[in-house]
Image (cartoon, rainbow, N blue to C red):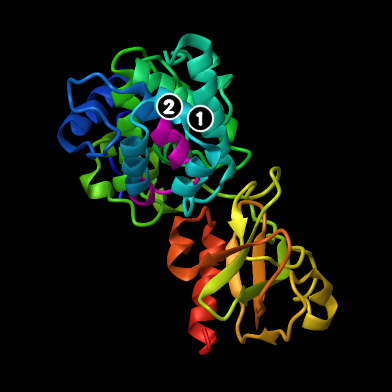
Amino acid sequence: MKRSVQQTEEHGNRPRVDPQAFRRRLLAWYDRHRRVMPWRAEKGQQPNPYHVWLSEIMLQQTTVATVGPYFMKFVRRWPTVQALARAKPDDVRKLWAGLGYYRRARSLHEAARVIVQQDDGRFPDTEAALRMLPGCGPYTAAAVAAIAFGRAANVVDGNVERVMARLHAEKTPLPQAKQILRDLAARFVTGTRAGDYAQALMDLGATVCTPRNPSCASCPVESFCAARAQGIAESLPRRAEKKPRPVRRAMAFYVTDGNGAVLLRRRPAKGLLAGMMEIPSSDWRKGPLPSLRRVQEDAPVKADWQLLPGTIRHVFSHFDLEMVVAVATSSGAAGHRWVRLPALSREALPSVMHKIIRHVQTHNRKD
Ligand code: SF4
C-alpha cells in the first residue's frame, strides 16, 4: 500500500525529513510518554550530572532493566562524585559485580577521582572535556553533554541508528552505514531541549521502533518514515554478515575445604575482569575443551579431581567462553583465599563465576 510521507527527495534518492517538524512531533510524544528512570530528572527539573554520567557508564552494553538496581545501590552508597572518588577500589568492584564489562567499574572510579581532583567535583560540561575522562567514549560524552548540560550533541547509539535507517530507508548495511546514519542524525540536533530530544529518540527506539515488530501503527513519527511507507521497516538497518565469534575454552577448579568454604583467587590487576575474584581455572585458550590430564598442572592444589558433567557458556564482548568444571576437597593452597559459601555474594565475583557455582550446586551432590 502506498502511504503519504512528510518527505522530499534529495540527491542520492535518500528521502529528506523536515528536522523541525520531526522534532516537534517527537518531543510532543516524549512529553506524554517519557519513560520514568531513577537517573532521569522530573519534567522541568535540572538533571543531576553525576546521576546522568553514572547511568550512561552503566548503560554501556547493559539494558535499562538490569542497570536500575545497580544505579540505586551506587547512589545510596556514594551519593556524590566526591563520595565515589573516596571509595575503595574493591568496594566499587563488589557493588559492580554482576553488571559485566568490569573495566567500566575501574574507569568509573578513576574518572570520579579525576573530576574531584580537577575542579573539586564540578563536572566537565562539554563533549570535548567529557571525552578526556577515563571510560567516556564519544557516545557517552555526547549523551552526558546533551542530557546533563543541554549541549547540542549528536547522541547516536544502536537505537538512534535504527530509527535513522528506517526514517530515511537507508539500505547500506552496518557497519558501513554508521557514518551515513550519524550524519543523518546530526541534521536533527539543535541546542533547544537537547537532552529531551536525545532521550526522546532513545525512548522511541527502545519502546516503539524496536528491532523486531516495530509498532509503526502507534508511532508518533510514522508520517515521516520512508521505511514504513515502503513496507521494509523491520528489515532495516541491514547488517553485513557477521564473522563467527572466537571461542575460548578452559577448566574451572572448584575446591572446597569440606567445611563449606570455597577457594578463590584474585585476577591480575590488568586485562579482562581485572582485580576481580574468581574460581581458579586453566588458561582460557583457543582449541578443544581441555582434558583433566592436560591441565592438571594449572590446578591450585594437588587433589583427587572429579570432572562434573555439562559445559558452562558465557559471552564476553570479543569471544565466547566454554568451561568444564572439576571439583575436589582440599585443605590448603598458597596465595588463595577461602570464602564461606554464604559470604560469596559479598565478593566481587563476575557473572561467569556465579554460573560456575550454580553449575556445581546442580551437578555435585556432595556440595
Ligand atoms: Fe520506526 Fe515504524 Fe516509526 Fe518508522 S514508523 S520510525 S519504522 S516505528
Q: Which residue does the numbered mark 1 point to in the structure image?
A: 139
Task: Judge left or right: residue 13 versus residue 219.
Answer: right
Q: Residue at x 72, y 69 (%)?
A: 249
Residue 29, located in which quarter of the rendered image?
top left
Q: Residues within 10 Å of mark 1 (few under 14, many from 20)?
A: some
- Where's residue 340, x and y in %? 50, 68
Q: Is mark 1 within 8 Å of ligand 1?
A: no
Q: Is mark 2 within 8 Å of ligand 1?
A: no
Residue 223, located in which quarter of the rendered image?
top left
Label for residue 143? 2
- The residue type indicated by label 2 comes to Ala
Residue 299, located in which quarter of the rendered image?
bottom right
Q: Is residue 345 above or below residue 222?
A: below
Cα–Cα span, label 1 and label 2: 6 Å
Q: Nearer the viewer, residue 293 or 345?
A: 345
Main SS of residues in magenta: helix
Task: Judge left or right: residue 23 versus residue 61.
Answer: left
Q: Residue at x 34, y 43 (%)?
A: 73
Tag 1 near tag 2, CB within 8 Å: yes
Q: Which residues are magenta?
A: 54-67
